Amino acid sequence: MAEKNDGMKVVAQNRRASHDYFLDEKIECGIALTGTEIKSVREGKIQFQDSYISIRNGEAWIKGMHISPYKYGNIFNVDETRDRKLLMHKYEIRKLYDKVRLKGYTLIPVRMYLKSGRAKLEIALARGKNLYDKRESAKLRDAKREVEKALKFKR
């Protein structure tokens, strides 16, 4: 699942994010990992299912992200779904906290990639979609696909 572009290697993407949420603002941040966790990340052993970001005591934490244990890690492996600290500036955390608290947004991970050897996480401010919003998105996607198919056929 690794694709490269501009020195970045995308290791995992949250495909359900754009299906279940309106993604308004995306932010890049670092993530604090142990040695065996970063090795698993490089192998692409990550799942974002049911993960979200919470802010407590002025720090951002990702909860529920599953990083599989490194197969050669023995005693150094840690709990797969432990809370991991996100590395962000205080003013960024404060700005996100205000939006989440006042406007009813939630913070979700969108993708994880390696940039210059460091693991980066792209998170998004998201608003939940209703069922009719999901249907509308599917309708637009299908219409766009039909137009592209017709244009391709004409050539």
Image (cartoon, rainbow, N blue to C red):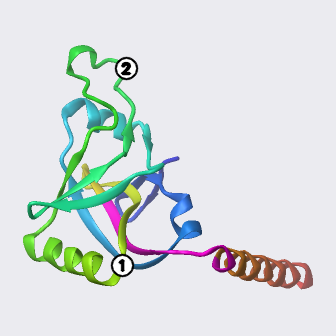
Estimate the x, y position of residue 153 in percent, counting from the top left.
90, 79
Dot 1: element:
loop
* Of the two numbered discs 1 and 2 in the rendering, the one whose residue sits closer to the viewer: 1
> Is residue 127 on the magenta stretch?
yes
- Alpha-carbon distance for marks 1 and 2? 40 Å
Kindly identify the residue that appears in the image at 56 percent across and 75 percent down.
Answer: 129
Kindly identify the residue that appears in the image at 9 percent across and 60 percent down.
Answer: 57
Estimate the x, y position of residue 24 in percent, counting from the top left.
41, 81
Residue 39, quarter of the rendered image? top left
* Other residues around mark 1 within 10 Å, as few (<14) / some (14–19) / many (≥20): few
Please report the bounds of the magenta region as a residue range.
Answer: 121-133
Kindly identify the residue that appears in the image at 48 percent across and 56 percent down.
Answer: 13
The chief SS type of the magenta part is strand
**Relative vertical location of residue 100 with respect to residue 12 in this rendering, above or below:** below
Depth order, front residue of 101/36 = 101
Q: How many marks?
A: 2
Residue 80, quarter of the rendered image? top left
* Other residues around mark 2 within 10 Å, as few (<14) / some (14–19) / many (≥20): few
Q: Callout 1, which amino acid? A: Gly
Left-right relation of 90 to 124: left
Mark 1 or mark 2: name the one nearer the start of the chain.
2
Depth order, front residue of 86/155 = 86
Q: Callout 2, which amino acid? A: Lys
- Numbered tag placed on residue 60 in the rendering: none
Residue ID for mark 2: 71
> Is residue 67 on the magenta stretch?
no
Residue ID for mark 1: 104
Estimate the x, y position of residue 93 in percent, counting from the top left.
16, 71
